[in-house]
Amino acid sequence: MSDAATPPDENPPPDQSRQAHTVCRRCGTPGPVGDDGFCDKCEKALEQACL
């Protein structure tokens, strides 16, 4: 099979989801966030809340 046989609709888009999540989902602070969309501070707070 060649690359031309695959319709462009089936190719996943570039990794835009990580670029889109530059704001924490919990506190809204802009900056680096983890895979779940939370900054380090909120991620630690959520871990403590689950204990």
Image: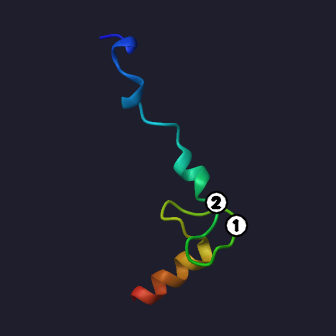
What amino acid does circle 2 point to? Thr
Q: Is residue 41 above or below residue 35?
A: below
In the rendered structure, which disc, 1 or 2, sits on the residue that comes first in sequence? 2
What amino acid does circle 1 point to? Pro
Determine which of the numbered discs, if any, sits on residue 39 in the image. Answer: none
Instruction: Count up the numbered dots.
Output: 2
The color scheme shown is: rainbow
Image point (48%, 64%), residue name: 36
Mark 1 and mark 2 residues within 8 Å of each other at the beta carbon: yes
Residue 27 at what x, y percent from top left? 62, 78
Image point (39%, 14%), residue name: 3
| SS for callout 2 | loop
Which residue is labeled 2 in the image? 22
Side of 40 where 11 appears, left or right: left
For the C terminus, the image quarter is bottom left
Image point (40%, 86%), residue name: 50
| SS for callout 1 | loop
Which residue is labeled 1 in the image? 30
